Amino acid sequence: MELSMKDIISVIKKRFILIALCSFVGLTIFYCYNRYVMKPTYTASVLMYVNTKDSSASTNLNDLNYAQKVVTTYINFLRTKTFFKQVVEESELNYAPEQIRGMTQIQAINNTELFEISVVSFSANDSYILVKAMQKIAPVVIHNIKNTAEITVVDPVIYPLYPSGPNVIWNTMMGGMLGFLLSLIVSFLWEVVDIKVKDQQELMKRYQLPVLGAIPNYNVFRRNKILTRLFKSTKSLSNMSEGFHEETKFIITEAYKSLRTNLRFTLRKTGCKKIMINSPMPQDGKSTISMNLAIVMAQTGAKVLLLDCDLRKGKIHKLLHLKGAPGITDILSGIKSEKELIQNTTYENLQVITMGSLPPNPSELLASVQMEELLANLEKSFDYIIIDSPPVNVVSDSLCLGKLVDGVIVVVIENASTYPLVTNAVSKYKFADIKVLGFVLNKIRMNQGNKSKSNYYYSSKK
C-alpha cells in the first residue's frame, strides 16, 4: 500500500487521539521510572596526559600522530585484569575486578594525547575512591610496561556532589518520542490491515464506480425506528418523530434527496426505470434505503412502485405497516394478479407490492418467465420501479433479478462492510453482465453512538 503525504496526514488526523495518548503515556511512564524507580548514579573521573619521550620513533612518525597511537596502546594496558586487581587492592572496596571493569570507561579525548578514566556507580563515595585508586595506579602500570612513558594527571578526581544520572528530562522526552513513534507505526499498520470500507474516496478509487449517496447513521438517535415521516411533505417536516434535532432532520433529508438527484443523472433513459437495491451481506440497510429512495422519488411527482423481491426475509411491509401477504410470490404463482395486490401507501404517488407468502423456491420464482412478464406489465404504469432484493453474497436471487433491471445500487456500511465482501459482490455482477450504477455509503459518521442491531438473517438454503 503506497501512502502519499496526504494519506499520512489523514492517518495522523484520524488517529490523533491514539497518538497523543500514547505519547503522553510514554512521557509519564519514563518520567516516573527515571524519577522514582531508577537509582541515581554518580560519576567520578580523572584526566591524564601521555608524554612518550621516544625520540627514535619520532624520527619516522609525526610526534602527535605517534602519541595518539601510544595513547590507544596505554588505554589497553589499563583494561587488563592485572590493573583492576590492583585497583581492588588499593581501594579496599567489596567489588570483584570484573564488576569494576563494567563500571569503568577509559577513552581518548578527541584523538589527542589526553585520555580520561571515569567510573559510574550508585555510590558517590565508591566512584571517588575507585577513580582515586586508578589515578594512583595507572601511571605505575604503564611505566612498568613502557619505561619511557610519562603519565601526568591533568585534571585530578574530585568528589561527585550531585548525581550524574539518570537524565530525567532527556529520558522523559525519549519516552514521549518512543510512544509517538510506536503509535504512529500502529496507526499505519492498522490502516494497512484494516479491510473495512472507510470513506467515499477509497471506495470510488478501488472500483471506479461513483458513490451516489452517503446516508448518515440516524440510528444513533433512535434504535429500530424507520424514517417513514421524513419525506411525507414539506409541511410535515415539523411533525417528524421526536428525538431528532432540526439539523439532523435536514441532514438526513438532504442525503436522500442528493441520492435521488445523482441517480437521475446516472440513469438517463426514456420510459420506466427499473432500479434494484442490493448489498453484499444482510443488515446493510438496503430495505430502509429502498423505501426512502422510493419515497423521495415519489415526491417529484413521478409514479413509483416499490417491489419487495426479498422472498426470504422481506420486511418492506413491516417498515410501511402494510400486509405482507398476499404479494409478489402469489402473483408469480398465478394465484393473484398484480392489479389486485398493488397496495397504496400514505405517500402520494408511491405504491407497493409486498413479498407475499414464503415460497419454497425463491430463486426459481425470480428467474422465471412470469417475473420477466410481471416487470414488463408493471413498467407500463410507473415511472420508477424500485426493487429490494436479498444480499448477493448470501443467495443468488439478486443475480436472477439483475438481468431484468436497468441497474443495481450496492449498499455498503462505513466502517462495517469489508472490501473483500464488496469486491465479491461487484465481481458477481460484472461476471453476470449486470450494470452496477454505483454505491450508497450507509451509516456514515454524523454523531457517535451505538448502531442498531437486528435479527435479520438468511438461510444458506436456496
Image (tube, rainbow, N blue to C red):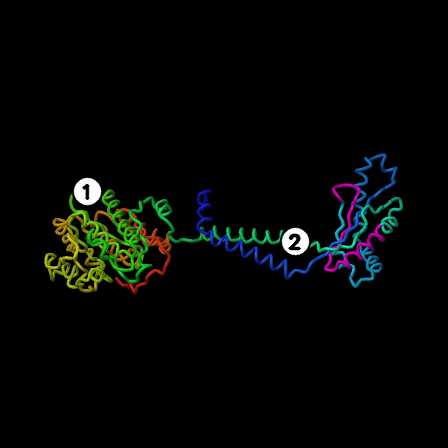
- Against 131, is 64 above or below? above
Q: Residue at x 62, y 53 (%)?
A: 171
Helix, strand or loop status at disc 1: loop
Distance from label 1 to label 2 (Cα)? 75 Å
Q: Residue at x 42, y 53 (%)?
A: 194
| Amino acid at dot 1 | Lys
Closer mark to the observer between disc 1 and disc 2: 2
Q: Which mark is residue 430?
A: none
Which badge, 1 or 2, comes first in the chain's sequence?
Answer: 2
Q: How far from the left and from the top, in percent, is residue 97?
A: 78, 59
Tags 1 and 2 touching, CB below 8 Å: no
- Against 41, is 110 above or below? above
Of 213 and 272, the residue lying toward us: 213
Task: Please say whether residue 132 is one of the residues in the magenta stretch.
Answer: yes
Q: From the viewer's perspective, tell me whether residue 324 is left or right of residue 188.
A: left
Q: How far from the left and from the top, in percent, is residue 155?
A: 80, 47
- For label 1, the crowd category at 10 Å Cα-Cα, with few meaning under 14, some 14 to 19 and many 20 or more, is few
- For label 2, the crowd category at 10 Å Cα-Cα, with few meaning under 14, some 14 to 19 and many 20 or more, is few
Q: From the viewer's perspective, tell me whether residue 366 is left or right of residue 30.
A: left
Q: Residue at x 12, y 57 (%)?
A: 338
Q: How far from the left and from the top, in percent, is residue 40?
A: 69, 58
Helix, strand or loop status at disc 2: loop
Quarter of the image for the C terminus: give it: bottom left
Of 74 and 399, the residue lying toward us: 74
Q: From the viewer's perspective, tell me whether residue 430 is left or right of residue 65.
A: left
Residue where numbered disc 2 is placed: 167
Q: How far from the left and from the top, in percent, is residue 446?
A: 35, 53
**Magenta span:** 109-138
| Amino acid at dot 2 | Asn
Task: Please say whether residue 225 is one of the residues in the magenta stretch.
Answer: no
Q: Which mark is residue 269?
A: 1
